[in-house]
Image (tube, rainbow, N blue to C red):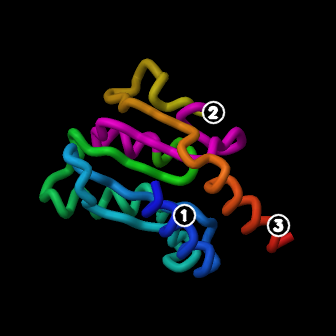
């Protein structure tokens, strides 16, 4: 989670919403890390999770991330949760809960949907205070 938090801090420094993500393999080795780049790339799908999952799949030379874990500072939105399902991650770990835009524990609850073809294990609330603080401070500075 510390690497994901570093990515989130770097994203904030670039003017992006401070969300960071890392993907590790079954042994815990780092495959990819990313922070949000939505503004920089002008791409609403350039969420940290999507960027990290894409890079990890390229690193492994395939389209699936079986046995891998996505660690992200904020509960994934519905798009990123569906991405985690399609990449077939083993586990999703996140920091801050997102009652407004979350897609795993809130909102769409993608993994609970009957049509979800693969539901990874989900663990939320890891370093929640720090992850939520980054977001709170970021948005408070812009209001």
The image quarter containing residue 59 is bottom left
The residue that label 3 is drawn on is: 140
Residue ID for mark 1: 44
- Tell me which numbered mark, 3 or 2, is placed earlier along the sequence: 2
Q: Position of residue 138 (x, y in %)?
A: 73, 68
Query: Do we see residue 64 in this rendering?
Result: no
Is disc 2 in contact with disc 1, using a CB cutoff of under 8 Å?
no
The quadrant holding residue 90 is top left
Q: What's the magenta region?
A: 81-105
Does residue 108 lie above or below 98 as drawn? above
Query: Closer to the camera: disc 3 or disc 1?
Result: 3
Task: Name the mark nearer the viewer: 2 or 1.
Answer: 2
In the image, residue 143 lies in the stretch drawn in magenta: no
- Which residue matches tag 2? 106
Residue 96 visible at all: yes
Q: Of all residues shown, which one is farthest toward the left? A: 61
Work out how far the residue at label 3 is from the one at label 2, CA to CA, in angstroms: 23 Å
- Residue situated in front as seen by the camera: 115 or 93: 93
Q: How many marks?
A: 3
| Residue at x 48% of width, y 52% of height | 72
Pinpoint residue 49: horizontal percent, then vertical percent: 44, 55
* Element class at badge 1: loop
**Location of residue 120 with respect to 64 vertically, above or below:** above
How far, Cα to Cα, is label 2 from label 1? 20 Å
**Disc marking residue 63:** none
**Which residue corresponds to the image point at 21% horizontal and 40% vertical from the top-left?**
66
Q: CA distance from mark 3 to mark 1?
A: 22 Å
Q: Is residue 84 magenta?
A: yes
**9 over 49 or under it: above or below:** below
Which quadrant is the C terminus positioned in?
Answer: bottom right
């Amino acid at each position: 989670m510390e690497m994901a938090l570093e990515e989130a801090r770097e994203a904030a420094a670039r003017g992006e919403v401070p969300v960071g993500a890392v993907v590790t393999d079954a042994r815990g080795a780092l495959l990819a890390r990313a922070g949000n780049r939505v503004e920089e790339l002008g791409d609403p799908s350039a969420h940290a999770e999507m960027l990290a999952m894409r890079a990890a799949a390229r690193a492994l030379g395939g389209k699936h991330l079986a046995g891998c874990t996505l660690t992200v500072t904020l509960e994934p939105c519905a798009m990123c949760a569906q991405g985690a399902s399609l990449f077939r991650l083993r586990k999703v770990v996140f920091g801050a809960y997102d009652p407004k835009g979350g897609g795993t524990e809130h909102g769409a609850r993608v993994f609970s949907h009957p049509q979800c073809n693969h539901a990874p294990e989900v663990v939320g609330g890891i370093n929640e205070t720090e992850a939520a603080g980054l977001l709170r401070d970021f948005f408070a500075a812009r209001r």
